[in-house]
Image (cartoon, rainbow, N blue to C red):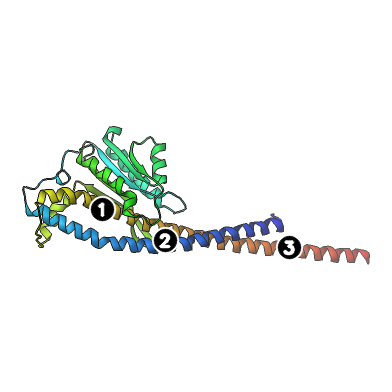
Amino acid sequence: MASLRDIKTRINSTQKTKQITKAMQMVSASKMNKAEQNAKAFVPYSEKIQEVVASIAGSDQDTEHPMLQEREVKKTAYFVITSDRGLAGAFNSSILRSVYRTIQERHKSKDEYTVIAVGRVGRDFFRKRDIPLTNEIIGLSDQPNFTDIKDLTSETVQLYIDEEIDELIVYYNHYVSAISQEVSSTRLLPLTNVAEEATKKSIEYEYEPNQQEILNVLLPQYAESLIYGALLDSKASEHASRMTAMQSATDNANDLIDDLSLAYNRARQAAITQEITEIVGGAAAQE
């Protein structure tokens, strides 16, 4: 049985750990609120640019652009968003498990796919398994700006325009609520849903010089905005997942402290009882 000193040391150690996890929980909660606001604030812009692109693309059947055209898929790019740090529950593992399973099921050769990794955890995961990486970015802030990933998004979209890849699938954690996040996979390129959206929109725009030139500018921006929107959504999910994980760790620390305190009190009581027994026994022996 552990001594009183050992139990007391474990109690003190657990209390210090609890203070750390409680602080991390509060920090993550603050970051989550900000990230959630950023994700929601981006939605109106995303919806508006989608509306404009759909209207222009659907107004002229002769308008063509590589990003709107379906073609034979010879190579797939997976844009995978993870975090740079752990201690976020199943945030990273669920994404990576889903992507890895998809790659194993869909592809027989490494020439058929590539990965664009956002986040150190995902980058390291794919490197260890010798999965081809076309591009990567780590060290993003907790509240990223579009300028932080502008180069990455533009290079990714250009891969499709140059026909180096034939489809782009984005994997990220979709923020549902503070306690719920779900893995989301979206086929971002080609933009085959633009034509479908065009039939739903009745707004007509006046534009100049012509549809083709406008689409040449707008379509890459639209695709980049979709990637950025997924990143904002993922950041909110990351902070929520970390907050939940730290809350669970704090609760576990409280339970452990309660158990250790009970064990400490029992050991202390047993020691006192032993001392009383020895005193009584010594007194009886002198009579």
Q: Nearer the viewer, residue 158 or 69?
A: 158
Left or right: 6, with 239 as reference point: right
At a point 35% along the width and 62% down the height, the residue shown is 36
Q: Nearer the viewer, residue 126 or 285?
A: 126
Do tag 3 and tag 1 residues touch (Cβ < 8 Å)?
A: no
Nearer to the camera, 2 or 113:
113
Provide residue 34's location: percent of width, then percent of height. Answer: 38, 63
Q: Residues within 10 Å of mark 2 (few under 14, many from 20)?
A: many
Number of other residues with Cα within 10 Å of mark 1, as a class: few under 14, some 14 to 19, many 20 or more: some
Q: Amino acid at mark 2?
A: Lys
Q: Is residue 219 left or right of residue 210?
A: right
Answer whether labels 2 and 3 touch (C-beta < 8 Å).
Answer: no
In 3D space, how far apart are the residues under numbered discs 3 and 1 (Cα atoms)?
65 Å
Where is residue 229 drawn, in percent x and y? Answer: 29, 55
Q: Earlier in the sequence, mark 2 or mark 1?
A: 2
Of mark 3 and mark 1, the one earlier in the sequence is 1
Question: Going 20% across and 38% down the picture, which residue do you hit?
Answer: 162
List the residue tagged with mark 2: 31
The quadrant of the image that shows the N terminus is bottom right
The CA span between labels 2 and 3 is 48 Å
| Image: 37 above or below 75 | below
The picture places residue 273, in percent across and down from the top left corner, at: 77, 65
Q: Earlier in the sequence, mark 2 or mark 3?
A: 2
Q: Which residue is mark 3?
A: 270
Residue at disc 1, secondary structure: helix
Residue bearing the label numbered 1: 226
Say which amino acid is labelled 3: Ala
Element at label 2: helix
Q: Amino acid at mark 1?
A: Leu
Q: Can residue 178 be seen?
A: no
* Quarter-of-image position of residue 42: bottom left
